[in-house]
Amino acid sequence: MVTSNDIRATFLNYFARNGHTVVPSAPLVPRNDPTLLFTSAGMVPFKNLFTGQEKRSYVRATSSQKCVRAGGKHNDLDNVGYTARHHTFFEMLGNFSFGDYFKEQAILHAWTLLTKDFGLPKDKLLITVYHTDNEAADLWKKIAGVADQKIIRIPTDDNFWKMGDTGPCGPCSEIFYDHGEGIPGGPPGSPDEDGDRFIEIWNLVFMQYEEGPPGTRNPLPRPSIDTGMGLERFAAILQGKHDNYDTDTLRALIMASAEATGQDPDGRFKTSHRVVADHLRSTSFLMADGVLPSNEGRGYVLRRIMRRAMRHAHLMGATEPLMHRLVPALVRQMGQAYPELTAAEPLITETLQLEENRFRAMLDRGISLLNDEAETIPSGGSLSGAVAFKLYDTFGFPLDLTQDALREQGKTVDIEGFNAAMDEQRRRARAAWAGSGEAATETVWFELKEQLGATEFLGYATETAEASITALIVDGQPTDHALPEQSVAILLNQTPFYAESGGQVGDTGYLTGPDNLRIRITDTQKKLGELFVHLGVVEAGTARTGQPVLATVDHTRRGAIRAHHSATHLLHEALRRALGTHVMQKGSLNAPDRLRFDISQPRPITAEELAIVEREVNTRIRENAEVTTRLMTPDEAVKLGAMALFGEKYGDEVRVVGMGNPDDTKSAWSVELCGGTHVSRTGDIGLFRITSEGAVSAGVRRIEALAGAAAIAAVEDESRLLAQAAATLKAQPAELPARITQLQDEKKRLERQVAELQKKLVLSSAAASAETINGVKTLLRHVGDIPAKELKPIATELLKSIGSGIIALIATAEGKAAIITAVSDDLSSTHSAVDLVRLAAAAVGGAGGGGNKTMAQAGGPDGNAWQAALAAIRKTL
């Protein structure tokens, strides 16, 4: 039997032989279309090539694109499990021409691949074309020899594709497979076309027009080709099946579900097995592409898919979590074609187990309430909207999960009542929030959050993404536009910009858009926990709400921030190991040019301890170990040994970041709860350098450090200064410590000599300059820059030389004054050295003075006022 993997390989190899570049599947989170929740078609990654906004090195491409349709305008979730061909996850095989070949070659490739490489019988194939596309109809006759009766002209939009209200568009030609007369249904365009006999397998889009304002459509200068063939549908045909769920990949997952639950794969729980198999694929691939469960946006859709599958596992009697046990079966089927699935297997397994453990506790209580209420509802009746809301609000039951459960009983939900209960809850929440004291400054953000919901953050996986402007705020007020040079706060539906939180500063960069729009983003802040507010200045063009923009984070700056934030995690663990587990974070800053880390620590950290810490961090950097991110509850994270970081707010689920190779006690050397952005491997940090350590407050020490390029620049600066110092001293750098010690010793020796000479000079000349004031021999003298410690011995010697009398000496150095006063014993009853020194100190800006009646010292900051100080003493005498 030809397998799904064989089909994928045959398709790609055929087009590779025919000059197409094989392009790997893009992520399920589209980076180039803010209107899409998930990548929902094979052409999505190539959208900008078709519009001319982007150029690549190739003009022909082929791919097998992962697709999800489970939210937004593309949502097949409700039908999955109940039909033969609806999926939340599927693969779209396609070939594309960007202004290269057109209809003739596209039709030739399709017919050759289907009838020769895959060997489909020609008489089983049916063709549709747009009713006015005579060119396509003639080419099918010419190339494939298809008879007129097997070429059906369709006048509806089913056979005319548009990218949007404006933009590229063109007619389609669809290829159908006839399963035979034994299957009910008619050909496309007939009253019975919704039957299962004729199944569309491939759609060829001939992109040849540009749709303009209503009523205008012009030929494109370079027509293009976009095709799409669903792998699951095609596998069913080649494997002789009529149901996609009977194909090899999905059947293998169904059998894994049956084995794990002990339930017949084709028995009463057939639908449940299908739901589990399909949803296992979509949830696993979404997590592999960076989407994790949450209560907003893509994460919320992921959680809905998970919980729908988990409810069906519960219905089948699974007493333990089921989904995570099926991941190995999925990896065996699809891991080779999609290596990202294999790489993410531990994350997927752990997240599914976490979600199912949490959901089962809610499910047991919620199902009991739902069943009790459902028993009172007649067939065809509706569940009260208030009860449906209670299930959602109290037990975490999404509305669609309740609808799905009731659907099996032929019952519905009162949607209007549900919405009314939701509105009432919002009203109460708003009233409670308005009384919290924040209303005066934050009302605008609350209203916008209520209206728009949370911002979808894409920045863990990318630094560039397309988005839509959902709100503009100028001077604190919402507006529909912002003009050049205006400062503006901007909300986007999704963003790669990280908003300041947890010590990590907000991103900067640019938003660019149509009509030369360019907005410089100077900061990104988080409001109300979920709104990412981009603060910036409109540099060119006019910003408008609803406008598409390309959001581009400053890559170099983000990289520097990542290095510092990741280094902070390693620093934290190194400090705890070096100083003790009492070390806890008390604050942090992770900026592009430095990091600051405050810790609980009762004493200064010695230079030796800092050196040990720095060496340990750099050892972990050189390991170049993978940095892992896991999702779990706070309690589970604490059991793992994770540390919570200061400034972070934690909800029901947390991101747990692991760094460094494992040791004997935990899964990674450093494990912390953190919502910030980090390097992929520790080696990406580059280098770590501690620059200072000091006290912040009692029991709190602050370490400042550099990482990455900033650390390297600091080392280079230090090396340059070292070389300059060595050259100045005519020594090698290694000789500098000894030379500096030698110079310091020489300096001290010379200072002692100078002080001794100054002392001798003062002693030899000062006594002769004594004067008599009111009968008292007095010596008032400015002695230059003699060290303050030499003043006392000089005053003592001078007092001996003059016998009875009063002495006041002032030395000045570096702008400051040092004063000493001395009074002989016979005069101490009438004159006080302390009183005299305080007079002088006041004149030089000082206060007080210490000593006794016969000897006192003081000082002041204004050495230039020494004359006024001596004059004050003279006057009092």
Image: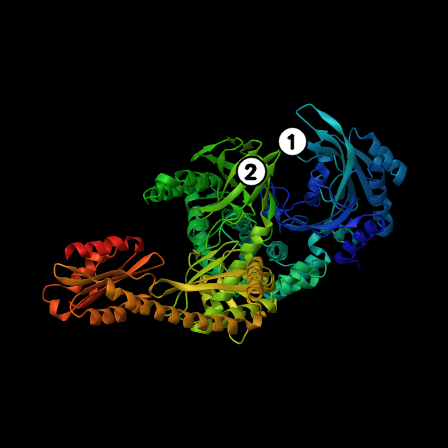
Residue 519 bears which disc, if any?
2
**Element carrying mark 2:** strand
Q: Position of residue 198 (x, y in %)?
A: 76, 43
Residue 457 bears which disc, if any?
none
Q: Is residue 236 above or below residue 467?
A: below
User: Mark 2 packing: few (<14 Cα in 10 Å), some, or many (20+)?
Assistant: many
The image quadrant that residue 447 belongs to is: top left
Q: Which residue ends up furthest to the top in the rendered image?
A: 215
Q: Is residue 732 above or below residue 705?
A: below
Amino acid type of disc 2?
Answer: Ile
Pointer 1 residue = 165
Residue located at (26% from left, 54% from top): 867
State left or right for residue 657 relative to residue 104: left
Q: Position of residue 841 (x, y in %)?
A: 23, 57
Q: Is residue 527 above or below residue 348?
A: above
In this orientation, which residue lies closer to the viewer: 499 or 572?
572
In this orientation, which residue lies closer to the viewer: 609 or 375?
609
Amino acid type of disc 1?
Answer: Asp
